[in-house]
Amino acid sequence: MFVVPPPPANEAARLEFLFSCGILDTPKDERFDRLTRLAARFYGADVAFLGFVDDRYQWMKSATSDGVAPWIERDKSVCQIMIATGRPLVFGDMQSDPRLEGHPIVPHLPFRFYAGVPLLTEDGAAVASLCVLKREAQDPSAVDLEPLSDLAAIAMDELELFRRNRELARLAETCPLTGLANRRGFDAALDRAVRRARRTRAHLSLLLLDLDHFKRLNDTLGHQAGDEALRRFGTILGAAARRPDDVAARYGGEEFALILPDTDAAGAVEVAGMVRQALVSAAIPHPDGIGGLVTASIGIATASPDALPDPDTLLSQADAALYRAKHSGRDCYCVSDCTS
């Protein structure tokens, strides 16, 4: 009888490595596609795929056929067994194997044979699976997994290279003053967030934040004071990006952004309130600010699962909301077409 396995003991480290790669919801990549093609040809499989498993989903980076869904909930995945154990897995006939009895997906699959190996980090954490599927059952004892394991090791080398290149790119996408993502990093992150929201059919919220009367602060107190205000606000916004997929960015000048995946309008408003309260507590001096302190105007746009716009549209909606916040007295937030 199938039972959803518990997360492995190294789940936190596993997820930290996976998220550090920045590979989820990235475009097709020939480096991985050639490996799944080789796996399918070597094993005479109907389908071969490479899937990364985060805390909630298995997302297919590469698949040789549309017969495999681009993503699946983790608790409905067969590969989650490998993620939990870190060991290869073979089912000669998934439809009759007692280990999969009661599985929510297997009875509906056109495949019977399954063989997979995990992609392992140096610390032994399984972050992905490389698998082959066949429509016909096969004797599991006759399966040689060594070639599949070799291909998985190559895939892991490519993933490590992807991660290191991502680290280099992150340096180029980081604002040196605030430590947040810069405009280039923001654009890339928003594109990934929109793709993920489309895949998972989840809400996506975007906050644009502007420090009020910042030019006046620079002109009166000097650029050093202005830079200090930007640094301190960057710290506040970085702390608001609490989850691995949240992204805080310096959008440009005194304008900042916060990308909040899996967050509806109410959640975005809550985060905006926290940021405003943290700004009050920080007590950053401003000659014309309320109480002599720096304040911020915030525009909030939220995309629903049923109407996910492209990145440019979502950005335009947040920018329009920010404009209304500024023209509603500043030191406030605006959600779509209403202010608070």
Image (cartoon, helix red, strand yellow):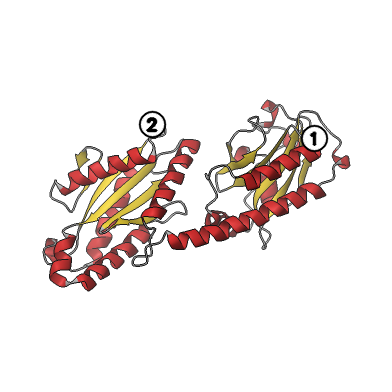
Tag 1: residue type? Gly
Q: CA distance from mark 1 to mark 2?
A: 41 Å
Q: Residue 217 location in percent, x, y?
A: 16, 66
Q: Secondary structure at mark 1?
A: loop
Question: Would you say 282 lies left or right of 105 here?
Answer: left
- Compared with 288, 28 (above or below) is above
- Which residue is denoted by mark 1 in the rendering? 44
Q: Is residue 286 visible?
A: no
> Residue at the location (36% across, 54% down)?
183
> What quarter of the picture does the N terminus occupy?
top right
Among the two numbered marks 1 and 2 on one chain, the one whose residue lies closer to the N terminus? 1
Tag 2: residue type? Ala
> Residue at the location (11% across, 63% down)?
288
> Residue at the location (43% across, 44% down)?
191
User: For residue 212, what is the image quadrant?
Assistant: bottom left
- Which residue is denoted by mark 2 in the rendering? 307
Q: Residue 91 location in percent, x, y?
A: 78, 38
Q: Secondary structure at mark 2?
A: loop
Q: Residue 150 location in percent, x, y?
A: 76, 52
Question: Would you say 261 lies left or right of 100 here?
Answer: left
Front residue of 11 and 132 = 132
User: For residue 71, what is the image quadrant?
Assistant: top right
- Compared with 21, 59 (above or below) is above
Q: Residue 42 location in percent, x, y?
A: 80, 40
Q: Is residue 68 visible?
A: yes
- Compared with 135, 59 (above or below) is below
Residue furthest right in the image: 142
